[in-house]
Image: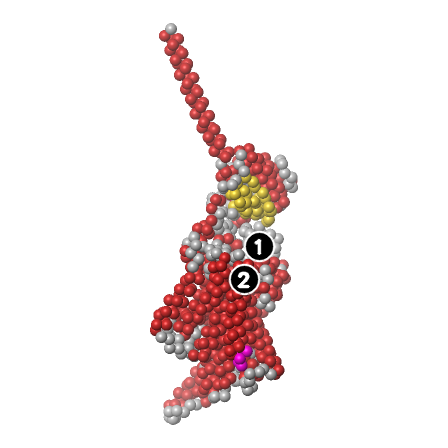
Amino acid sequence: MCSNIAMSTRTMFLVTISVLVCVVGANVNTTSELSGNNSRMAWMKGLLDHHEWVALLGNVTVPAQCEADLRRYVTALNEGQLWASKILDASGQYSNNILFGNEYWLGSQNACKDLQLTQYYTQTPPFATTFYVAKINLTVDAEHLPESRLMLVGQCVPASCSSEALGAVLAAAETAASARAAATGIVATMQTLYVRPVPGSYNIFHDTKFHILVSVMLIVGLWMVVASGYEGYLERRYRAMVEKRDLELASQNNNHKQPPNSTTRAESDADEHCKDKELRRETCGMWSELLLSFSVLSNGRAILSTQTASDGALTCLHGMRFMSVIWVIMVHTYLTVFYIADNKTMRTVTERNFMYQSVGNASYCVDTFFFISGLLVTILFLRGEDKKINNKSGPQTQVADKDINKNINGYTNPALSVSVISQQSFYEDLLDKPKSTVYSKEDVFKMTKSFFVLLFYRIVRLSPAYAFVIGVNELALRYTHDHTVFEPAIFDHITCDHFWWRNLLYINNLYPQREMCMVWSWYMANDTQFYVVGIILLLISVKHMKFAMISLFVIMGSSWATTIYISVWHQYKARIQEPFEMFDPLYDKPWSRIGPYLVGMIIGWYLHRTKCQVKIPYWVVAVGWPTSLAIIASLIFGMVDGYFEVWPTAFYVSVGHTGWGVALAWVSVACCCGYGGLVNSALSYRGLLPLSRLTYCAYLVHPTVMMYTSFLMDGPLHLQNSIVLTIYAGYAVMAFLASFAISLAFEAPVVRLLKIVSGGNRNKKTH
């Protein structure tokens, strides 16, 4: 009986152990199964698994060679062959940060190309490979990816497979993925929108516009080489002549003692030639000067010169202009890196930073250009008027006035100044006439003629460099779109092809953003339109100053009212995250941005009338600087909560731009009149003069440099402030180097050609 009990006990013990093992095993297996099937991340990781493609090929119709190569590839992949592993490794698959804004599973186009090189690798595919980028629409339940995520996925596949064949394989993968999601109760979908080859079929060497652009560059380049060689010869001959003359003068001085105040003709000629410190040769005839206008020697010296003008009153504008351009470049760098980052949610994190407002509220940096432009246009016009009056006073006054004008209208950014080339005709036509309160028909005709001549010279001065950049930008973007693994949001290869003429007529800001060639060139259109308004007001002011001033303030008030009305009508709420939300209705429109330009005109008139000789009480200085800085700080960093309501937004986008001009007005007056202190020393630093002269072309070309270099990358960047600042520094350097080349070839020569054609050298000796 005891043995039966013992046996029964052993049996029960074994059964109990077995049951426990089964229960535990069942629980473990169930947990593992649920974890695997219900994991959204596991589902996403298996979306583009090439190991399963053999099973998919039975459900799709693809070319026979493509199917054979795919089967051979997947078989080798499952066998662990290196070349097949490299193909999978070069293809885009699930990667981290999908829940932190990653939109790129790109793999590597370079790796797909490199793995075929038999001269470097012993194991290579038995077929050629090619690279495609597919755009898929991915949705995972209401928590993980509740909104459709558009993903760009790179795929390295046999070259025998077309984009249609790969699309068919991906469609079969979609069906399998949907079946897996449905079987485990996951609400998730994957849909392929398109598949495109990278690179595409575009060949830049077959593009007619490329041939035209290269021809222009070769002609201009040859002209520059010949002109530089010829000028080098003239300079060497001139130096030899001067040395010989100096020896003769020294010999004469040793043999004959001259009266203290006597001068020789040679000395007078030497003084005449030394007036222009950048010209190291004798002045030639018109045809020779036309050739020499493209010389790299004299143009390079003019651009890179750090010599300040004789009066030095307005040198602070150079620093303001340079700082504004590098501010623009910084903002565009952030926007570019945001677009190609694999952690786009980091943008939201960055936007929470208080200092990021300097990026989100950076529209005021362009207002600095408008302010400077209005100031310089007014000063040049009024100084030209004084020059006509001084012509009757004697040559000494003329020379002094010439030096003053050189300070403003030397080789500077043409977009921020008015050419004085044609102003002489206006003064000769109008200012010689006795002033009366009523314009005669002759006065109206001559004013109209002067207006169109001024406008014509401005457009001719701006357009060559502008047109060249438009051509380069269109070709660069067409090539980029064909070769990029990304999907650029700018389509200048289309818009510039159709609407380039709007840019050269300076009316592109009056059209929708989607139709704009070089979106950032809205500034050029605005500045030219403001120039038209400014010249009309200045022409009127010759006889009716009060009426011109009243008109100026009426235009300013109308700008505020119009902007407020449009902003409130659209119920616009300014947000730090969307600075360009109202681009078409407000951002680039002249009626919203003219305020700083008009303030600049007022300050230009004031500085001209006072000759920058204003005695400002110290209490005004003590109040003026903090007030100016407070206005600047409030406009940039005032959006503490990241947004404004409707009515605060209306005043922010209307009066705010004019307020920026008012703040700069104090900086300009204080610096020009001797109350700038360290600020004026920094803004007037001589090293900034060459960079200031390059701001026009740097502004035009820097987005093209950014888009070309960033969108031709093999994969995304990982967003971090330190990386952005490093890239920003590189972009700034590249932009100014490109600007220097464009200025040498198209901007500086045009300035010299216009002076020659308009008779700027009529008083100089010819040979």
Of residues 514 and 703, the one drawn nearer to the viewer in this rendering? 514
Judging from the image, the colouring scheme is secondary structure
Residue annotated with mark 1: 481
Point out the tag, 1 or 2, that comes first from the N-terminus.
1
Q: Is residue 204 magenta?
A: no
Above or below 307: residue 271: below
Residue occupying image coordinates x 60% and y 83%:
440
Above or below 362: residue 233: below
Kind of residue at disc 1: His
Residue occupying image coordinates x 55% and y 78%:
540
Q: Position of residue 218 (x, y in %)?
A: 57, 67
Kindly state the secondary structure of the residue where label 1 is placed.
helix
Q: Position of residue 173 (x, y in %)?
A: 58, 39
Residue annotated with mark 2: 565
Of residues 102 and 250, the one drawn nearer to the viewer in this rendering? 102
Kind of residue at disc 2: Tyr
Q: Position of residue 275 (x, y in %)?
A: 45, 81
Q: Is residue 543 magenta?
A: yes
Q: Nearer the viewer, mark 1 or mark 2?
A: 2
